[in-house]
Image: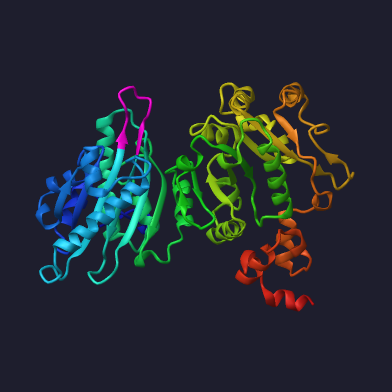
Amino acid sequence: MVLKLKGDTEISEILPSKAKALKINLNKYIYGTFAEIGAGQETVRHFFRAGGASGTVAKAMSAYDKEFSDAVYGVEEDGRYVTEERLKQMLTYEKELIEDRLTRKNHPGKMFFSYANTVTTIDFAKKFKGHGWVGIKFQLDPLEPFNEIILHVRFKETDAKLQQETLGVLGVNLIYGAYYLNDKPKELLKSLYDNLHEIQLEIDMINFSGPRFSYVDNRLMSLQLVKNGMTNAVMFGSDGNNLLPAQQLYKANILALRGSFRPVTKVNMDMYKLAEELFLNENKVQKENTKIIFEITLTNLSSKGQIDERDFLDRAELLSSLGQNVMITNFQEYYKLVEYFSEFTKARIGLAMGVASFIQIFDEKYYRNLSGGILEAFGKLFFKDLKVYLYPFKNNKTGEIVTSENLRVHPRMQELYKFFKYNGKVVDITNYDPEILNVFSNTILDMIANGQHGWEEMLPSGIAEIIKDERLFGYSRRKFAQKK
């Protein structure tokens, strides 16, 4: 259904949840099971109330008892029930069950699905707000393999009943999107908030898989979550699959390196390796419990006014090739990033950054929205067990190497800087390679754009070959051949 606006602009009308459920119920080809744990049978309730549910609902169940749940879906090694692994077990079990019990002879045109969620709502003490996993396995053709969409949500409402209702609406949106918006994954993603608001829930991870989503890059879907305001941070691993930040960062020591990584340079990797060495030498920091994060802000990705998805994937491709975990955030200020990390861990946090980025932290213009100004921001930044590992900067005009000992901040900030510096919160990276201090991403990009040779030596081993082979950042063999 479409609404007409002034200027002949068209937008899709947001259907109420009841209308979505009814449209699915009236589709004689959609047929499946609902398995919901932890917040009642809130999703299937919409389909029963819409009418005509007998044509859609093959079975609805809620295995609340843990022993009963284990008997149906198996025992998880970690003993937890609100996990991605548990959700996948539920989806697979129910999908196989419906295929086993309903023959294609009697249901030749049916497109089977299994919908499941496993969640925990807010506790009585209101200490834990609740979160959960929601997913669907579904067919778009009876002869095709199943597709799958899995997502993680964090509830923001402070009432269990409201959270249950929110979950029910989300489930309807997911099932409707799977069948009617599967060819438009970005629109499907946005539709998950139909009849909902950002203040009700946060979606911080989503993965698409299956034959109909073979062209979908889940890293781009992660980017859309941040871009659409559905979450403030997303994360993906070196294999390109999206990761749940809360799961990765839980009780971990975290070392984060912020940059444009356009492309990743020898300076970036030198900074990372030397900062990691210093970080691992800190008390209470164990290598096996340390997470390294290469962080890119949404502001950095949209520096030209809009996000270039190809450019984003180019950066992601190179960092993944180096085996790094990448995080995309909406945190322009460092204190917000540290606050976010502190939601998941009380262990030590480290930030690796260059001198130029560090000096910007002392610019008061970034904290005008805070009632306590820069003092409030620094209290949030350094209150936790945090250290900054500072990579030097070379002044090309004077040849001076700038470190924590001779950097210059605004006169009003001098005493504030000294306080943190001499309390051990700022540590200089000293064993750097002086030969690469003149390496900058912008220089490399300009050289690639102009067909100039020599940029390869500014990059970590193997990166130049990837850029050439995959023609990243506008690289053209013809342009370089003409320069010979």
Image quarter (top left, top right, bottom left or bottom right) of the C terminus: bottom right
Residue drawn at (73%, 54%) of the image: 266
Depth order, front residue of 347/58:
347
Q: Position of residue 172 (x, y in %)?
A: 25, 49
Image quarter (top left, top right, bottom left or bottom right) of the N terminus: bottom left
Residue drawn at (22%, 48%) of the image: 72
The colour scheme applied to this rendered structure is rainbow
Residue 176, visible in the rendered structure: no
Q: Residue 390's image quarter?
A: top right
The prevailing secondary structure element of the residues shown in magenta is loop
Depth order, front residue of 30/36:
36
In the image, 445: left or right of 334? Answer: right
Q: Is residue 461 above or below residue 247?
A: below
Q: Position of residue 281 (x, y in %)?
A: 69, 36
Report the span colored magenta: 120-131
In the image, 344: left or right of 181? Answer: right
Residue drawn at (64%, 44%) of the image: 257
In magenta segment, residue 247: no
Q: Residue 384's image quarter?
A: top right
* Tally of numbered discs: 0
Q: Position of residue 5 (x, y in %)?
A: 33, 53
Residue 415, visible in the rendered structure: yes
Residue drawn at (62%, 65%) of the image: 472
Tell which residue pokes out farthest to the right in this image. 398
